[in-house]
Structures are given as C-alpha cells and as structure tokens.
Amino acid sequence: MSTFTFGAKGPTSLPPSPIAHAFPHIQWDPLSSLRLTAQETALLRMAETNPIEYTLADSRDASMYARVLLKLLAEASSVSGGAGAVATFTETVPDDVAMKALDEDPLGVVMHYALTKLFEIISTLNSGVSGVTVGAVFYVGKDGVLVDQWKALLRILNKGGKGDPYTQKGSALCLAHILLASCPSLRSSAPTVDKDGQPIKARPISYASAVEPLEALTAWIVSQLKNATGTNVGLCIPALTALMGTTETRVLFCSSGGVKYLARQLRVGTKGAKGVVDSKKKIGQSSVQQLYELTFCLWTVSYELNTNYTIRSDFAKDGLTIAALVDLVSIAPREKVVRVALSTLRNISVCEGEQSPPPAGLPSLDGNHFLSEMIACGLMKAIDHLRDRQFTDPDIIEDVDHLHKLLVENYKEMTRWEVYKNEVESGHLQWGSTHTEAFFKENARMMEGSDGDFRLVRVLIALLSSKDEDVAAIACYDIGEFVRHYPNGRQIAKRLGAKELVMPLIEHDNVDLQRHALHCVSKMMVQNWEHVK
C-alpha cells in the first residue's frame, strides 16, 4: 500500500474563539448559575496566573482543573442553551464587540473559554511536556474509568442546529481526543518518557468505559455527514480526522455506515466542478480544503481494507466511493487533493482478501474488483491527463505510474462487454467505443443478462433520471440502440417503463440531451429507424 504517513497534518486543532478578547474579563463571582464552589473558583484563577505546564504538572491537580472546565460547560449549556449572541460570531471580533458579548451573553463566553482551555490542556498533555498523559487526567480510579463529566460535551453536540457552531466543533474535537486515549492500539505505541527523558508512569485505562461514548460521538459525526451540507459539514471534520488515528475508531466509523456518507459528501463537493480552482473557492458546496480533509479521512480508512471484508464491501457498495475519488482526480482541484485521492485509489487497487475472506455465499472483493470499477468510472482517461502534467511531488508521480500500469493490465484482461457492463453498473457513463452502433450490433443479446431479467436495461432506464445530463443523454442513446438491435427490443423497453421517462427529456433545456431523447423515442416508435434517419 501507499507509504503516505499517518503523521501528515490533519485539521485536528481548534481555532481561536472569535470572542477570545473577552476571556481575561470574565468575573466568576457574579455568575451564580455556574454553581462554582470557592475551591473551584480559586482553581480557575490560579490556572489563569500560572503557566499551563505548572497547572498540569500533577495529575490530580490537572484532573481537578479539567473537571471544573467540564462543569462550566455543563452548567452554562444547561442554562443558556448555547444559542445566545456569542453563537452568531464566526470570525474574530474587536475588543469592544467581545466586551459587549460578555455583557449580553456571559454564559456563551464562558463556554468558549472552557472549551479553549480544555483543548489547551489536551494539546499540552499530548505534547508530552508535563509528563502527565490525557489518560491520567480523564480516566480516574484504580481501574482508570472515564470521568462522568464527559457527558457535558455530548449534550452540546446534541443541541444540533440550535447550538453554537464553535462550541459544537470544539466539544466534538475535545471529546475525540479524550476518548482516543483509551484505545489499545494507540496506547501500545504511546511514548514511555517525556521530552526531558523522564519516565511517564503508565496507568490503567478502561477502554470499556469509553466504548459507549465513542459510539455516541461516531453516531453524531455520521449524522453530520449524512444530513449537513457545505460549511456545516466542517463542524465534524476535526473530530473525524482525530478519530481516524486508531484502528478501533476507524472500524467503528465504518460499521456505523460512515464510508457511504463520506463518499457522498465528496461527490456533492465535486459536483459541477471543472478545471483547477483556487484553494478558497467553492467547488459545489465544499471548499478545496474541505475536500482534502474528507479525502484524507477516506485515505486513512483504506488501510483497513486488507483485514476487514465488511469495509471492502462498504467501499464497493454502489460504486460511490470509487466514483467520488475518480471525480477528484479528474477535476484536480489542487495538488494536495490529487495526492491524497491517488494514494487512496492506490491502496484500494492493491487490497487483498486473504486475511479477511468473504462470508459463505458472498463474492470475493480485492484490488482487481476495484480496478474494474475504476476503469468503468473513467480513471484511465484521468490518469492519462495527469501523466501529461508536471508535478513537483514524487508521491503523485509514483502513484500515477503505478495506477496506470495496473489499469492497463486489468483492461487488457477485460472484454469490451465487461468494460461496458462495469461502466453501466457504476452509473458513470462516458462517451466512447462502447456507446456506438457497431457495439450494440455485436452485443445487443448480452443485454438479456444471465437470468434473462434485462438488468442492464433497467439500470439504463434508471439513469435517465440522472442529474448528470451527459449520463442521461448516453442512457437515451444506449436504450435506443438496444431497441434497434434486440429482437422485440421496442416492447421490452416500453414494458420496463423507458418511454415514460424519456418523453419529458424531449423538452429538456440541454440541447444534446433533448436530441438524444427525441432519437430514443423515435426508435421506440418507428419500425425502420434507418429510413427515418
């Protein structure tokens, strides 16, 4: 598989709060709704006056401080709901605006403050500066059980569209890092000494206590991918990227249906895009940066293909994942997007099934299967275009050459009918030698299918409703040629409902689609099409 490293930077940091200028002016005593004890208030003040490393030097003090911050989130969110004036700010505001927000929505400012400090704790602990670990702070008792206060973060997420986008993004990211600390695969590779060479004392951490929270966080992320659009998807991307760091969380994401919705977001993001665009320009409903981040997550999941048949079947389902990646390579929005998309396709193309064979009765899925999908989606053409471009990244050049070699070898072993069948089943129709009169003269009878159910004809009829006008036009042409060259093809196409779907396309705004729809209907209505032509 590709040697692209997991150390590549992902979007796992929390940006500064837009009202950070108000933080030093928070007065804790008047905020009685937070129900802080005198000891908790003193701890907050002490943490403000001392370097963060000093506060975190002792695991018990660090744990107490973290739990006070979680209490702030729990109390503030239960009173304010997180939908006050602060929730409307998306960019950093001047001092006077921040101070006005503190007066009008003090609990909203407190939530931003608590999340900023909580993430600072996690970042400092992960850097190994203090010698104390995230596990030592958030997992307590002799069994290392996750602190109950984590639920405050989940409650913020569950507020949905009524919540503050910044606090939702921050809560998801903080919760992800807290829960990752329990994953066995991450703990096995954790450092044993801090930056000064001092040993880091290992403590028991209960992964079992984090499983339910992980499932809840993953469900929220998948729901965002499923339902959110455009920039709203960005709320979950930092947390998702963080969760891609361990085998346990990648498998959990896939078992929750995440691959399908991740691929769907990529396809929505590339819709309507052509050519090279600026990094901040919108492509469909997504920015180039967001496309990169989503593709990065899909790339990390591709490392589970060899060991998990279910994940391979998720990648194969409906051809959606391959089509999304091929679209990215075809439009080439930015070199870094092309690099990670190619790395993902390369991983998929060489995946094997020996370590995780299919259950009885199910087909084997390996690199050859996915290469056929890639060919059907037009990757060969996209790769040929990339070979003509000058790239500075040697990884891109290597992946392009590797994929080109595999695609050519796979294509040579396929008959023209297999190429056509795969293309139709992928739904990614492109004009070429299989959409010609000569092809249908030779292969019209193959449209019956092995079961005589004319499944490919049914797929073509379904593609008449495609939002991609080129796909709909090619489907019109292919149905018309099937009608011409298959005995009784006219009656079969009509019986399967082709005429009802083609007729409205005659009045379509797209002139080419209109023309192919008219020809298709004419072929269904007229016995001797050649005379009309």
Image (spheres, rainbow, N blue to C red):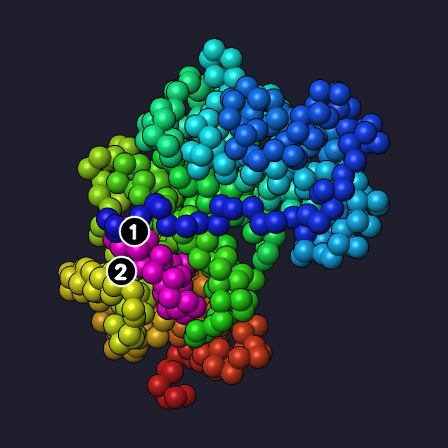
Q: What residue would you read off at disc 2?
A: 395
Residue 180 x %, y %: 45, 32
Residue 79 shows in this picture: no
Kind of residue at disc 1: Phe
Residue 519 x %, y %: 44, 80
* Closer to us: 257 or 415: 257
325 within the magenta span = yes
On screen, 513 above or below 323? below
* Closer to us: 319 or 396: 396
Kind of residue at disc 2: Asp
Please report the bounds of the magenta region as a residue range. Answer: 323-349
On screen, 85 above or below 193? below
Q: What residue would you read off at disc 1?
A: 4
269 within the magenta span = no
Of the numbered discs 2 and 1, the one sitting upstream in the chain is 1
Task: Specify the label residue 78 is tagged with.
Answer: none
SS category of the residue bearing label 2: helix
- Residue drawn at 75 percent across, 24 percent down: 36
